[in-house]
Structure formats: structure tokens, C-alpha cells
Amino acid sequence: MTGRELRLTLPATPENVIVVRQAVAGLGEALGLSRPRIDDLKTVVSEACNNVVLHAYEGEPGPLEVVAQPRSDELEVQVSDQGKGFRPHATDADPSLGLGLPLIAALSDSFEISGGAGHGSRTTIRFGFVPPEFNNNGTPTEAPEELEIAMTPGEIAKPVLARVIGALAARAELSVDRLADTVLLGDAVSSSEGVDFAEGRLGI
Amino acid sequence: MLTISGEHDLSTAPSLRRRLDGLLDEGVATVLDLSPATFIDSSILSVILDGRRLAAEARIGFAVARQTASDAVDRVLEVTGLRTELPVHARLEEAIVAASGNGGKTPS
């Protein structure tokens, strides 16, 4: 353990989420994070802990493990359990996965969930000391006008191009004849390595 | 009027849900005042959304107020879009008027 690392292992109960939240917020203070950034950190860590409390052990007791490790310009927080892992619950009235994961995604710089059925789960959150750009009005930065696909020439080109061209053709509701043309086009493009198109582009 | 203060999360969501459901069951137009709250998580947002749905189904007034705008509660309301969606009234008086106008008994 490094000098500034924080490790917590405690029963995965609703009452313990605030303990984790306050401990990590204290670490944030010690690292000099701004108040709004600490607020975000508290929300993100709470939501990750909620997922463990609500879904890991299905009502049985089990551990909630949290490791927070400061790095040069970010704080990495791992929230782990030894339970059943994330599972879809089609009839689950519990909303935490509905709003919880989007909140983690919106307020952290990056996050990932690892694990599998029967192996527990781990949510790893990377939290930059400087807030990520957050677009409050929800406007996309800039949508591309064309589809761009880049891949290494070779065996993957044919199946990828054939499926993409087929999907575009289907969306365009082409006639059967024109649809057949696109299939031929896909085959031709994908089987012709090194073919040059005008400015490297293929128009459909 | 239901006011929540301090930090609220998974551990307090059941009690908030019971109190909110109780008011709506009685047909009382309800204002939920989040002004003194310093933290809410997704489980509390869920209680609020369920309360709004129940109130709408029963045609009972329901409104949310938040007179301050400076901490984790506001950040969560902004990020989820709920400040606009609910909506969250910036003045308590506005929330009371909104709840009163939606039917049900007068907010207590």
C-alpha cells in the first residue's frame, strides 16, 4: 500500500455506503480537489457501491471492497464485490442500474466494469482532478456527415464491408435489383485489395 | 410539505418512500422540498420519480422545490436532466402553487 492509498472492506449494506462516500471525500480533500469535484466523486462512488449493495449478494451478507489510489493527475477508485456479478433483471423494480451507471459515466472521466457470473464484479472509476468537459445542454459536439470505416486490408474486409453495405442498402429501401447490385458491389470492393477510389472514398 | 435535509441515499430511501406514499395515499397535494439536502443518489431520484408518477395517476398535486444551487444535489439534478424534467422549482412558493394547481387537497 502506498502512502496515500485508501482501502476499505466492510459489509455491503445500505448504511455503509455513506461511510465509503465520506472516506473517499476525505481523500479528495487531502488531494486538494475542488468542492464541486469532491461532490462528483461522492456521487460516483456512492452509485458504484449501490450496485454492490443491491445486486451482488441478493440479500445475503458479503463484503464491499473499495480501493482508492491517487496517481499523478487522477484518482482511481475500484469498487469490488465477491458476489454474483451484474445480471440483467427484467422484472427488477430496483432502479439503481437505471440511473446509477449513467451518473457514473457522466461524472467520471472513465469507468469500466469487469467480472462475470459467479466471479464478483469490479467497477473501476478514473476520476481526473480537473473536471471533464460536460455539455450541459446535451448538444452533440459535431456529428459526422459521412460514415467512415478504417480497417487493415485483408480477410476482415469482406465480411465487414458486405454487412455494412447490406445494412445501408436495406435502410435506403432499395429495390431488389438495386439491392442485388450492392451485394455485388460489396463483394467486388472487399475482394479487390489495394483498389484506389476517388480520394480514397467510395460513394453509395 | 415534505422536507429532506442532509445526505440521503439507499439507506434513507425506504423511509422517504413510505412518507411520500403516505401523503399521496391520503390524497394530499405534496411539495417535496430538497433545499436543505446536501446529497441525494439515484435511489432518491427513483423515489421522487415514482412519487410524481403516483401523484399523476391519482390526479394529486406534486411538486419539487430546491431553493439553493451549489452542491452535489444540484449537480445530480442537472446531469440527469431532472431539474427541467420534473421540474424543480427554484422558489418554494412556486412549488406550492404548482402542487395546488394539480388537484388534491391543499399542501399541508
Image (cartoon, rainbow, N blue to C red):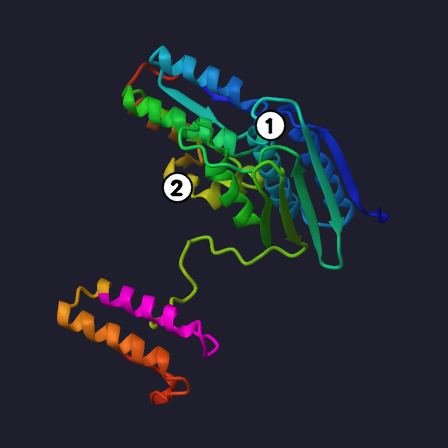
Placement of the N terminus of chain B among the 4 image quadrants:
top left
* Label 2 – label 1 distance at C-alpha: 36 Å
Q: Chain of mark 2?
A: B
Where does label 1 land, which residue? A57
Residue A195: x %, y % from top left:
37, 88
Residue at x-position 44% and y-position 18% = B20
Q: Is residue B67 left or right of residue A163?
A: right
- Number of numbered discs on residues: 2
Placement of the C terminus of chain B among the 4 image quadrants:
top left
Residue at x-position 51% and y-position 30% = B43
Residue at x-position 59% and y-position 54% = A110
For this rendering, which residue is in front, A84 or B51?
A84
The quadrant holding residue B10 is top right
Give the SS element for disc 1: loop
Disc 2 to disc 1: CB gap under 8 Å: no
Q: Amino acid at mark 2?
A: Thr
Magenta stretch? A147-169
Where does label 2 land, which residue? B84
Q: Chain of mark 1?
A: A
Q: Residues within 10 Å of mark 2 (few under 14, many from 20)?
A: few
Res. B70 visible in picture: yes
Q: Amino acid at mark 1?
A: Tyr
